[in-house]
């Protein structure tokens, strides 16, 4: 039987989400700073690739690292965003959307851990 690593994975994602929220908050705080370039961190998918965790595909219809992964590209924040008159590249709307994504992902993370914990407790009690 393989060890259950869901809790470790959820912990890593929670740490990643905390760092991303700090970066987004820094971008919002510096929205009026002249020549400030907005920042973001690497996507969690790339962090997953570095850890050695492998997600299993139990159905051929599940997404894998096949042809869809080649279509995903990363763009530079300065090339993607508009530069303000002050030379600042922070777009408040995008930063607020990122903050909402972090909140949603964190709620999903904690909800999954809570449900998985309840399932484990039900198995142990029987």
Image (cartoon, rainbow, N blue to C red):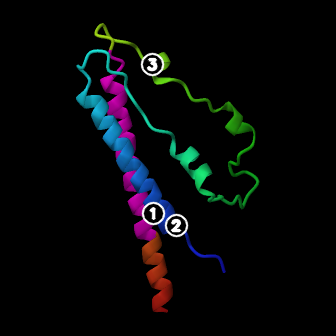
Residue 123 in the magenta stretch? The answer is no
At label 3, counting other C-alpha atoms closer than 10 Å, the crowd grade (few under 14, some 14-19, many 20 or more) is some
What residue lies at 39% left-to-right and 48% top-to-bottom?
Answer: 17
Pinpoint residue 33: horizontal percent, then vertical percent. Answer: 24, 20
The CA distance from mark 1 to mark 2 is 9 Å
Q: How far apart are marks 1 and 3 (CA)?
A: 35 Å
Nearer the observer: mark 1 or 3; the answer is 3
**Where is mark 3, residue-wise?**
78
Mark in the foreground, 3 or 2: 3
Whichever of labels 3 and 2 marks the residue nearer the N terminus, that label is 2
For label 1, the residue is 112
SS class of the residue under badge 3? helix
Label 2 sits on residue: 6
Image position of 84 (left or right of 29): right
Q: Residue 18 carries which label?
A: none
Q: Residues within 10 Å of mark 1 (few under 14, many from 20)?
A: some
Q: Earlier in the sequence, mark 1 or mark 3?
A: 3
Labels 1 and 2: the sequence-earlier one: 2
Residue span colored magenta: 88-115
Label 1 element class: helix
Could you say where residue 64 lies in the image, as x and y percent from the top left? 70, 48
């Amino acid at each position: 039987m393989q060890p259950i690593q869901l809790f470790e994975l959820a912990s890593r994602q929670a740490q990643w989400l905390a760092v991303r929220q700090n970066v987004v908050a820094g971008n919002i705080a510096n929205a009026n700073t002249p020549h400030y370039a907005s920042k973001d961190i690497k996507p969690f998918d790339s962090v997953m690739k570095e850890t050695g965790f492998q997600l299993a595909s139990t159905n051929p219809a599940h997404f894998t690292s096949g042809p869809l992964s080649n279509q995903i590209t990363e763009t530079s924040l300065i090339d993607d965003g508009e530069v303000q008159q002050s030379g600042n590249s922070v777009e408040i709307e995008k930063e607020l959307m990122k903050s909402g994504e972090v909140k949603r992902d964190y709620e999903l993370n904690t909800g999954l851990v809570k449900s998985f914990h309840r399932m484990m407790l039900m198995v142990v009690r029987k």
